Image (spheres, rainbow, N blue to C red):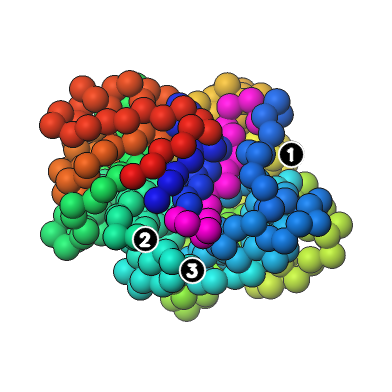
Amino acid sequence: MNIVIHRGSHEIGGSCLEIVNGNDRILVDIGSPLIDPDTKKPPDIKGIYKDEIAPLGIDGMLISHPHIDHYGYFEHLRDDMPYYVGAAAKKLIDLTVLFTSQKGHIGQFKPIEDRKAFKIKSFTITPFLVDHSAFDAYAFLIEAGGKKLFYSGDFRAHGRKAKLFHKFIRNGPTDIDTLLIEGTMFGRSSENVKKESDIEKEILDIAMSSNKNIILAYLSSQNIDRLVTLFRVARRSSRLFVIDFYTANILSEIKDHARVPYTNKSIFPEVRVYFPHLLANRIAEKNRKKLIYRYRYYKINRNEISKKKHKIIMLVRPSVIFDLRLIKGLDRGDFIYSIWQGYLNNTHTMELIDFVKDKNMRVHNIHTSGHADIDTLKKMVDKLNPKTVIPIHTNYPEQYENQFTGFSVCMLKDKEEFYF
Ligand SMILES: [Zn+2]
């Protein structure tokens, strides 16, 4: 096998890996970069982009999970591209395209499932469902020509699916030839790593102690673990769980794949839906009003929110400031910042923070990383017992050698070929 990391050998974000065996070629992930996305271009790979007349140059495109730094450049890919991706992950990608400025569409959809091996030409690929902040995320064992490659994707062992990691250590592949493993947490503090159950406890403490005020929470609506956490806090503190209709759509799509709360008056009476002005306009312009109307029976308007403010946990994001201005009684409530700290530099995020501070709300930073701490990475490497470890999805590839003692680490540059 031959591999090339097109992007991600020295960078978090924009992951793209090409694997070649004889005449057979597959790609794993086609992410857009997180840093300087405007100045960077999609990787130079023949036979995959829309404007090419040549025949399709790739036998399959694996998408490890629905984070844009792993699939965002798919908007440029041709329609006859076969995509191997989880069914729930595909739904989340489709919703991202509907609700945000991300473009693209999954051409030929080939659903993948945990530990169900499939073939693409001479490759045998086994997906392993992993615990990550993205839902329906996979690592891949890729075998061809008597060699074994393992791609970790993004993973961790402290979320609501931590059991998957322990199962992997008990009953996963071993004696791998080449391991590509993420190293997001190199250079980041391990304080960022808390169990999801600890996050739940911290937020519950706030909900129980401030029983006169509203709680606003800013998180990714696709961080399903965190949505479950917020819902559980709402239920345990007898509050309504007020979500926007984007989040309501996500939960409706995911409910057949996981135990999540969703709009259903008898099972989850706490779940109520609001309709942010900007988002409603955008969806109406796209002629997709059904995505709004399907939640009209769960509607909570601003008067009801104002009246019941001490009985509410409400999901917010920078684009709903317009709606928040119309709600009375936010003063001295609690605001939970529950996404990556790096977004604090974003102007829209700053506007939201300024807004809540203006209202004299208390700001709490409560979040945990989507990525494995160093100890977990080591356990993964020990289990896989690879001949070679190759850094990917990391800002600090040079730290691998010191951490994974006893293993041979090979730092590649972007675009450099590696044969094994
Ligand atoms: Zn990710």
**Spot occupied by residue 213 in the image (x, y as percentages of width and height):** 48, 40
Question: Does 30 lie within the magenta span?
Answer: yes
Residue numbers of the magenta segment: 21-37
Q: In this view, does 296 lie above or below 183?
A: below
Q: In this view, does 234 lie above or below 208?
A: below
Question: Does 129 lie within the magenta span?
Answer: no
Which element carries disc 1, helix, strand or loop? helix
Comparing labels 3 and 1, the label whose residue is closer to the camera: 3
**Spot occupied by residue 37 in the image (x, y as percentages of width and height):** 66, 31
Q: Can residue 255 be seen in this view?
A: no
Q: Which of marks 1 and 2 is nearer the N terminus?
A: 2
Q: Name the residue under label 3.
A: 121
Please state if 410 lies on the left or on the right of 273 as rendered. left
Which element carries disc 3, helix, strand or loop? loop
Please state if 408 lies on the left or on the right of 413 as rendered. left
Q: Which of marks 3 and 2 is nearer the N terminus?
A: 3
Identify which amino acid the numbered label 2 is placed on.
Answer: Ala
* Circle 2 residues within 10 Å: few <14, some 14–19, many ≥20: some
**Spot occupied by residue 141 in the image (x, y as percentages of width and height):** 33, 58
Q: Which of marks 3 and 1 is nearer the N terminus?
A: 3
Residue at image position (81%, 56%) is 53
Q: Is residue 32 above or below residue 35?
A: below
Q: Quadrant of residue 301?
A: bottom right
- The disc label shown at residue 144, or none: 2
Identify which amino acid the numbered label 3 is placed on.
Answer: Lys
Please state if 341 lies on the left or on the right of 401 as rendered. right
CA distance for labels 1 and 2? 54 Å
- The disc label shown at residue 322, or none: 1
Identify which amino acid the numbered label 1 is placed on.
Answer: Phe
